[in-house]
Image (cartoon, rainbow, N blue to C red):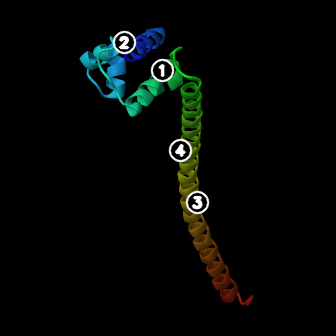
Amino acid sequence: MQRAFGARVREVRKLRKMTQDHLAKAIGVGVTSLAKLEAGGRRIDLDEAILIAAVLDVPIGDLIDDPSLSKLVRKLRDDLKAAIADEMRWQAEFEMATEQAVIVDEMRAAAAEHLIEAQRRVKDARQALEAQEHKEGLR
């Protein structure tokens, strides 16, 4: 299984025209460590497998599918793939909403500044008018 995972990582990496150096840097390991993984000589944990799949932009199941797996394991992996896809989608939604909230906050702050300036100008204009009207006896 370890060898098959490494072989799939190499296959997908090459399909993506990605160098070992690029992938290694993206997942935070050395090139030698990645080469061992691709050769089936290094074990990894689930978090690292998920990261590799994300960097390669493939569902994790595409890297770990094995025809000898039981139906239950396949179903559980499919469930995991679906959960990861949901998590990634909602993470993106959350980040977009956060960015929009920041933009709205910046717009609100700018509008408040403009409103305060406009209110000051109205007050100054009103005072100038009242003073002139009083001076001319119109009040």
Residue 107 visible to the viewer: yes
Query: Contact, CB < 8 Å: mark 1 with mark 3?
Result: no
Q: Amino acid at mark 3?
A: Arg
Q: Which residue is mark 1?
A: 64
In this image, 1 relative to 125: left or right? left
Q: Which residue is mark 4?
A: 95
Write the residue at 40% across / 33% down: 47
Mark 4 or 1, nearer chain start: 1
Residue lying at the far right in this picture: please name it.
138
Write the residue at 48% across / 9% down: 15
Label 3, secondary structure: give it. helix
- Kindly report the distance in space between the C-alpha atoms of the residues bearing marks 2 and 4: 29 Å
* Mark number, residue 108: 3
- Kindly report the distance in space between the C-alpha atoms of the residues bearing marks 2 and 3: 46 Å
Mark 1 or 3, nearer chain start: 1
Write the residue at 51% across / 15% down: 68
Label 1, secondary structure: give it. helix
- Kindly report the distance in space between the C-alpha atoms of the residues bearing marks 1 and 3: 48 Å
- Please determine whether, in this image, residue 138 is positioned above or below residue 51: below
Mark 2 or 1, nearer chain start: 2
Mark 3 or 4, nearer chain start: 4
Label 2, secondary structure: give it. loop
Q: Position of residue 5 (x, y in %)?
A: 42, 17
Q: Amino acid at mark 1?
A: Ile
Quadrant of the image containing the C terminus: bottom right
* Mark number, residue 19: 2
- Kindly report the distance in space between the C-alpha atoms of the residues bearing marks 3 and 4: 20 Å
Q: Position of residue 106 (x, y in %)?
A: 53, 55
Mark 2 or 3, nearer chain start: 2
- Kindly report the distance in space between the C-alpha atoms of the residues bearing marks 4 and 1: 29 Å
Q: Amino acid at mark 2?
A: Thr
